[in-house]
Amino acid sequence: MTIHWNGLSGLPQALEWKRYFWPQSLNAAMAEINHKFFPKATSIDSAAIDSLESAIQASFAEKPEVIQRSSTFGASVADAVFNWSETDGYKHASDPYTPPVGSGLWVPTPPAFAAASTPYWGNLRPTIAGSIDNTQCGPLPFPYSTDPSSGFFKMVLQVYTASQNLTAGQTAMALYWRDIPGVTSPGHWLNILHEVLQQTGARLGQAALAYALTGASINDASISCWQSKYKYNQVRPITYIRGVMGYSTWNSLLTTPAHPEYPSAHAIISSATAEAFTKLFGNIGSFTDHTYDYLGFAPRTYSSFKAIGEDAGNSRIYAGLHYQPSIDTGLIQGTKVALNIFDLISKNTSKSDY
C-alpha cells in the first residue's frame, strides 16, 4: 500500500543489497519517537524507554551489524517523521483567542471557568490531504431559544432529565468513556487497536499499517471536529441548565471540557476510528474491550466496531456534556473523515493489500 502523508517527503531510504531486520527498525523508531515526544521526561522515565528498547532488542537473534543497521535506519525515520509533525501548526493551536459573545454561544464553564481550549486546532494540517473535505456539519437542528416549548429547550431538557435518572449501567458507561488516566479518547482507541491486533493475530506489517491509519483517522477527525466547534461556538448544557432552566447548582456527572459543545469530539473521533477498524479488519464479530480492567472497570462487549463508536458517543449524554443531536451529528462526521481517508488511499492500492 502506498500512503502519502501530507507534506512528508525525503524520508531515509534503506540501502540496497543490505539486510535489515524490520522488527528492530520498528523498536528503535518507537524508542526514538518517545524520546522526541517527551524531551522533559525525568531521568527515570527516559531510562525506562531505553531499557524497554534494549530488552526487546535482546530478544532478537540477528547478527550485530544487522541490528545496528536496522536501529540506525529506524531512528532516522522516526526523526524525519517527528520533524515533519512539528510543522503541522499545533504550536499555534492555543494562540490568544477571544470567543464571540451572544445568546446561545459558548462561555467558560464551572468549576474552573477555563479559557477556550485549543481554539485553532482546526487549522492544523491533516495527515492525509483531502481527508476532511466535505465533512463539516451544518448547525444544530434547533435554533437557540429559551422558550420551554422550543426544540432547543427540549433538547437540553433531555440531558437534564437523563442526569436525574441515571441507571447504574448508564453511569458505568459514562465513567468508562471518561478515559482516565490521560483523559484521552485516542489513547483508549489505540489500546482497543492493540487488543484487536492480538485477537486477529496480525503480523508486523499489518499492525504498522493499522496503527498508521488509526492515527490518521483520529488526528484528521479531530481537526474536522474543531473546525466545527469553533464555527458554531455552541453553549454547553451546564450553562443553559443553570442559567436558563434555573437549576443553579446542577453539575454534569463528568467535568465539562473547556471548549464549545457542538459537535461531540468523542463521537467524531470514535466513529472515525470504528470505521477505520471496519475497513482494516472487516467484521470480526464479538469483541470485548478490556482497556480498564486494571482499574476495576467491568469489560464491555460489542457486536461490531460501529457499536463501540456509538457507545463512546452516547456515553456523553449520560456524562451531561452533550446534546443528543451533537452526538448523532458527530458519529456521521467522523465516519465521513475515515471514508475519505480510505477512498484516497484506495486510489494507490488494491483492497487485497490491506
Image (cartoon, rainbow, N blue to C red):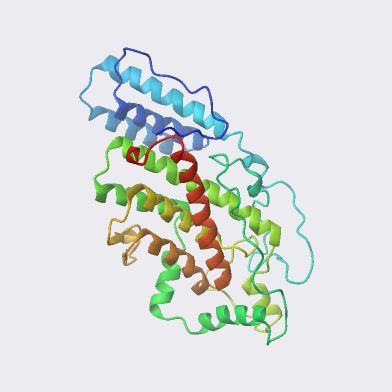
Q: Residue at x 62, y 43 (%)?
A: 124
Say which of 327 and 94 sits in front.
327
130 in relation to 236, above or below: above
126 in relation to 30, above or below: below
Residue 126 seen: yes
Which corner quadrant holds the C terminus? top left
Which residue occupies the extreme right position in the image?
101
Residue 255 x/y as whole percent: 56, 67
Q: Where on the picture, by quarter, is residue 284?
A: bottom left
Say which of 267 and 63 sits in front.
267
Q: In this view, does 279 lie to the left or right of 101?
A: left
Q: In this view, does 216 lie to the left or right of 205?
A: right
275 in relation to 107, above or below: above
Q: Is residue 214 left or right of residue 95?
A: left
Q: Residue at x 34, y 21 (%)?
A: 70
Residue 75 x/y as whole percent: 42, 25
Q: Which residue is drawn at 52% across and 69% down?
A: 254
Which corner quadrant holds the N terminus? top left
Residue 289 x/y as whole percent: 32, 59
Q: Where on the picture, by quarter, is residue 57?
A: top left
Say which of 350 and 201 sits in front.
350
Residue 91 x/y as whole percent: 64, 40
